[in-house]
Structures are given as C-alpha cells and as structure tokens.
Amino acid sequence: MSMATLRPAEPSVSDLQRVTNVFATTAAWWTVLACVCAVLLAPLFVVDVPPLLDYPNHLARIYVLAFGDQDPFLSRMYAQHWALIPNLAIDLVMPPLARLLPIHVAGRVMLAAGLLAPTLGVVVYHRAAFRARSYWPMAAALVAYNSLFVFGFVNYLIGLGAALLVAAAWLRWRDAPAPALVVTGAAATALLFFIHLFSLVFLAILIGASELGWLIARRHDRAEWRRRLVRDGLIGLAAFSPAVALYAMAPISGVGGTTSWTPYQLKVMESLESFSTYDGRFDIAFALVFLGGLWFATWRGALRAAPGAVIALGLTMIAYVASPFFVSGTAFVDSRFPILTGLLLFAGLRWAPQPSGRRIAIALALTLAFLARTASLAEVWHSHNEDVSRMRQTIASVPPGARTLVVSLWPKDAPDYWDHMTRGRENPNFAPYGRLDFHLAALLTIERRAFWPLMFAAPSKQPLRTLPPYDRLAAADGSTPPPFKWLALAPDDPAWVHILTTTPYLRDWSEHFDYVLLLLAGGAGDLSGYLPGRLELVERTDVAALFKVRRP
C-alpha cells in the first residue's frame, strides 16, 4: 500500500469556506450578545443608588446582615433570624459580597444579576426549544427594565432567569433516564424555592405547557401518548415534591391577612408592565407599537412558536386576569404574570426566514428602540443622583442609634406639586401609588446607623428580626410612610382610633422618636413653624426635611 493511499484527503475549498462561515457566524452571535449585555448594564455605572422602590430597604437589611453583629448600635436594634424562608437569593449572596466591596457597589452587582438572569435565561431557553442560535431572544433586553425591576424585585427577576435555565435543561435532557431527572429536578426546584417562590410557578408553566404541546402534537399515537403522560407526570410530581414540602414547612405558608384585587379597568393598562419604567405614555405607546408589530408578523406567518409556547402565553394571561393584587401578606401578585408573558414573547417565538432587507430593517428598529429606552432610563438614573445627594444632606446630622420616624407628603396634600413630579420618583403607570422614594430613608441605616420603622424584617419573609424595645416602633412588613399631617392631629381626635389600628407605632410618637424625616418636603409649604412645641426644623431640601423632636 502506497503512502499516497494512507494520506488523508485534503479538505475542499467549499469545506473550508463552510467551517469559516460557521466560526464567523458563531463569533458574530457572541459579539452581539456581549454588546447587548454591556448596554443593558451601562445605566448601573451612572448612579450610586438607583431609583428602585424596595431596593434601598433590601440594601439596608443586607448591610445589617453583613455588619450588624459588630456594630454597637445596629446590634441593639436587629438580630439575624435564619429559618426555612423562601426568596433568600440576595440575603445569601450579598452579605459576603458586601464585605469585599463597598455596599452600594455590591448592591449594583446584584441589580446586574437581576437584569442579566432573565435575558440570558430567555437566550438559553430559546436555543433549547428551537435547537438553533438566533438573535431574536436577545431582544428580551427590551423588557429587562420593567415595572417590577423598577419596584426593586431583584429576587423575583433572578428567579425567572433560573426557571428559564431549568426549563431549558428539561427540554434538552427530557429523554434521560427517569431517576436522573427526578434527582436533578428535585435539587433544582429546592434551589428555586430559596431563590423566589414565583420561579416555581414560572417553571411549572414552562414545563407543563411544553409537555402539553408535545402531547397535542402526538395525540394520534395513543400508546406513546399514554406512556409519555404517565412517565413525565410522575417525574414532574417527584421533582416538585421537595419544593412543595419546603413551602408547607415554611412560616410564610401560614401567613393570612386580607386579599385585595386590582380593578379590571386598571388591569388593561397594567398588562403592559413588561415595558413600563419611568416614561408613562411613551412606554405604553412603545408597547402597543411593538405588540402590534408582533401581531402583524404572526398574521403574515412570519413567526413560529415552540411546542407549548402559545399555551404558556395563554396561561400567563389567564393567571394575570384571575390573580389578586394582594394575598398572604404579598403585594403585586397579579403584576408578576405580565413579566412572564413579556419574556415568553422572546423565549418561545422565532422568526421564519426573511429576506435580507427585512431582517436588517427589523434588527435596526429593535436596536434603536433598545438604545433609546436604555438611554432614557440612564438619564433618569443619573438625575436621581441629585435626590440621593439631597437625602444624604438632609440626614447628615442624625447621630448613630437615633430613632427616626419617617412620614411623607401625599397627593391630596399637594396636588400641584404632584402633577409636576420629577421623573424617577414614581412609576407613572401606577400613579398616584407608584411612589419610588418611599424607602430612600433606608440610608438612615446604611450611612447613619440609625433606626427607622420601615425596615424589611418580617420573620416569615426575611432572615432578620427587630429587637425589643425597637420592635414596638417598627412595621416589619415595610409598609408605606404615613401622611405627615397625622402628626398634627389632636390627641383626642377620633381619627387616631383607625390610625393606631393600622400604624400602631405612631402612638405617643413624640415620646419614642428622636427625629422625624418628612419625604417630598418640597411640596409641603413653609415648615419652619410646623408643630413648634414638638418639632424643631434641622434641615430641609426638596427631597426631605429633618426635624428634631423637642422633649418636654
């Protein structure tokens, strides 16, 4: 046998070109994904404390978990309280991170996780559902900044990304041996329980809809249909059982309370929450144009759906309509489903092949929209630095350990001021109750090591508890600051009967608090003579006013 016979065949020019094209396409895809992530995170570099409703409160709790035991003032106010509590993602990860980085930098790292997790989860799920890379799921960055991110629900958003990753793994390895699926599935659902409960809901929708779509597509093969139904049903029950058991043992499962519902006329507008940030009518207009374009593309047959994707979209929309706003001590329950719907538009749909000119036009339109929305949000965040600076100026004289009552201006107290509210202080699509400044007073804990009543420290929800005697001055669920005009009510005013039922820490407030912090003081008029026998004005800015309580 000659050496020529043993020599491997030379690759043809077409083979080399095909390999080159594959590498070029892959490199381009990863480059675009990296650019999308970079633009998505850019606003985090222009602000110290972003205007996100719950975020400062969560950051204050993390600060106490990280440093409270060693602090002579905070250790008298709070103690760690670890239990079988769900929704612990930031509580587990951030305290060690806060010991390595400045607290506000560590906080923005977690915000970055809340932005990237759903976006990358959509990309991975789309790849698993369609068995191909696509640029379309990257457009999920358009809804990364949404109403619930603006409200500071970081654990929730990280949980959605984790649910998408687990669902993608199911699509990829659903035919693996059943014991392996049960073990890995049980571990995954237990992990999701501790990240956020709603991630389990999303995972159940994703996997259940996918399996139902598969069964519908093969409904004529009765034997295979029955086999798959029994096998996957048993695997699903076994995989989700640890999460169900954890919930049954968790304190939150026994939390009762009232249930309230969003008026259905408001649900129509709030169904667009995936696109809602700080721009009100512009956000709604963009959402309508975007969804109208998707509807038109679907009508023309330009969009394809993954198995079960349409079912999942329908389930999220039905759940939104049927769910209450507040239940078991948790608010914005129904508002979480439109975010799922928004992510599914990118995770479960794919464009059919389009002419190159049309592809370029679509890509250009999506890119410009993404850049415009991100730039607008970055402008709001950068402007918010001034509000944060003024808050720091206002509370600068509060000494460590001081007890500070936080009250607020409300719309009916200054309607003209409210009509010209600075962008970044509210989510306009939830006005007048979309206030985003309620928890900025948490800087009292982070930067002054002082006490304020609204720290998130509910034993059934957070691994932190308020110690006596401070617990009698606290609203552990972090409820909204009361109206400042309540402080001026006479002691014998009948209104106190209702006030003390809902806000008991206001009883004899002037005897128990050292300072009073009034939010949105710019709309409160002249405060120099406000309750002169009980309060002394110390500092005032447009953002807040600080009073020292006069002792008898």
Image: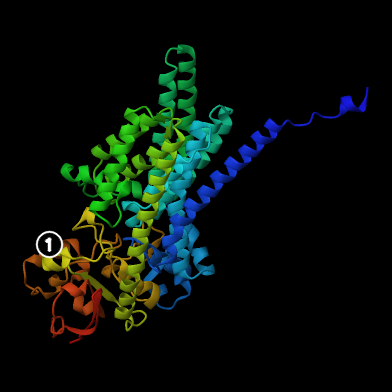
Q: Is residue 497 left or right of residue 300?
A: left
Extreme-right residue of the structure: 1
187 or 481: nearer the viewer: 481
Q: Splitting the image into 4 quarters, where does residue 420 fall?
A: bottom left
Q: Is residue 23 left or right of residue 314?
A: right
Residue 121 drawn at (x, y percent): 47, 44
Residue 90 visible in the displayed image: no
Residue 117 drawn at (x, y percent): 46, 49
- Name the residue rendered at 65%, 39% in the picture: 20
Dot 1 falls on a residue whose secondary structure is: helix
Q: Quadrant of the N terminus?
A: top right
Residue 19 visible in the displayed image: yes
Q: Is residue 281 left or right of residue 448?
A: left
Residue 255 drawn at (x, y percent): 30, 49
75 or 136: nearer the viewer: 136
Q: Splitting the image into 4 quarters, where does residue 363 fall?
A: top left
Residue 185 drawn at (x, y percent): 51, 37
Kindly identify the amino acid type of the residue bearing the numbered disc 1: His
Q: Quadrant of the C terminus?
A: bottom left
Residue on which the image places disc 1:
498
How many C-alpha atoms fall within 10 Å of the one at disc 1: few (<14), some, or many (≥20)?
few
- Name the residue rendered at 29%, 79% in the picture: 394
Extreme-bottom residue of the structure: 552
Q: In this figure, what is the number of numbered marks?
A: 1
- Name the residue rendered at 45%, 44% in the picture: 138
Colouring used for the render: rainbow
- Name the residue rendered at 12%, 62% in the picture: 498
